Amino acid sequence: MDTTARREQWLREVAAAADAAALAALETRLLGPKGEVQELVRSVTSLPKEERPAFGKAANGVKLDVEAALQQRREQFAQQALAAELAAGDFDPTEPGPRPARGTLHPITLVQNELVDLFTSMGFQWEDGPEVESEYFNFDALNIPGDHPARESQDTFWLEPHPGLGRNLLRTHTSPVQVRTMQRLTRHGFHPPLKVIVPGRCFRSETVDKTHEHTFYQMEGLVVDRDVSTANLIHTMKTCLRVILERDVQVRLRPGFFPFVEPGFELDVNCPFCGGKGCPVCKQSGWIEILPCGMVHPHVLREGGIDPEVHTGFAFGMGLQRVVMLRYGIDDIRQFMGGDLRFLRQFPEVTR
Ligand code: PHE
């Protein structure tokens, strides 16, 4: 079969196609599954063995040429169509193009931003601390003795020890930043009052379920001054919960044990879902446990370089996911890290 003649013939036909529709039909006729060009390429199998390489090469060359010619002609038609549209004046080149999809902030970030705004407006400073923490700041400095169950490997992600350095871990709470902050300030001769918040990511070796995550966010708060009392703690917490849950709240304190506070409390808020009457979310109690807190233990103040005879303080450790769940009525903590965009897109876009 004469590949040269076929090639000329097809290229003429492509050049003669009257419009885009005719060109598309021609393309199917030539390159479709049973197309003429495809047949030519396939016909190599019917030739004697010695003729195959040369013919195969020629046939493939024809196919490439036809494809290129079709492509070129398609572009010509597209250009012509655009020129016609412009000439007719129906096309407005100043009209903005399609808007790129815009991301939204993660619900934890939204709530964290609100809390940071609120606390900074009350005179708190934002402190930061490392996620890879030393055993000293995460435990010892916080009056958590070596045999405390919180150090057990099922709770803490320990890191490979470095010879000569203490053991490191992924911080299990934001409380280590309490002593970090106090030490940094007192080392430079600064004395209370001091008011800080520490939003941050924490890690615990937990089995993940509806209410537990191995990676979670806390916001620590620490206030140290003369005559700081439990009344100050309650007032601050009530203000914070009222703003973040967007309603008037009642709170109650129950004793809670944390080695770095004395006395320590669990602060409960009246259930936002039933208003305190009792429902499945609050397990019929009318109250939801929301944040552990307490008066800073004298050992911890002393470790931070502050004299507990002169100054007292309170601290709290708010679980951010928990607050977000209450705020938006989310019942499964795994949603936050699950990466499901349908979940994430439900939260209002905010520009700050
Ligand atoms: N760090 C504690 C925890 O994660 C919470 C806490 C913070 C308790 C501050 C009291 C005071 O469990």
Image: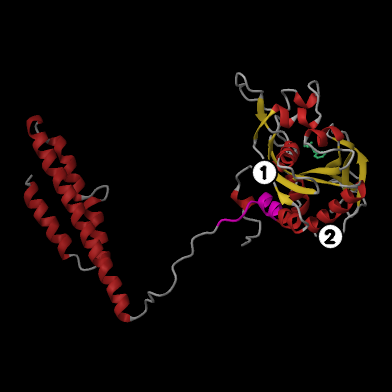
Q: Residue at x 40, y 75 (%)?
A: 94
Residue 89, percent across and down? 34, 81
Identify the residue position indicated by label 1 in the image.
Answer: 128
Q: Residue at x 72, y 28 (%)?
A: 136
Residue 1, percent across and down? 8, 44
Q: Are marks 1 and 2 in contact (CB under 8 Å)?
A: no
For the C terminus, the quadrant is bottom right
Q: Is residue 291 visible?
A: no
Q: Quadrant of residue 71?
A: bottom left
Judging from the image, what secondary structure is the residue with disc 1 in?
loop
Q: Mark 2 Cα within 10 Å, few/some/many (few <14, many 20+)?
A: few
Residue 220, percent across and down? 76, 44
Q: Find the magenta span and give its range.
A: 103-113
Identify the residue position indicated by label 2 in the image.
Answer: 247
Q: Amino acid at mark 2?
A: Arg
Q: Amino acid at mark 1?
A: Asp
Q: Which mark is residue 16?
A: none
Q: Main secondary structure of the magenta part?
A: helix
Instruction: Pick the residue in front: 247 or 29.
Output: 247
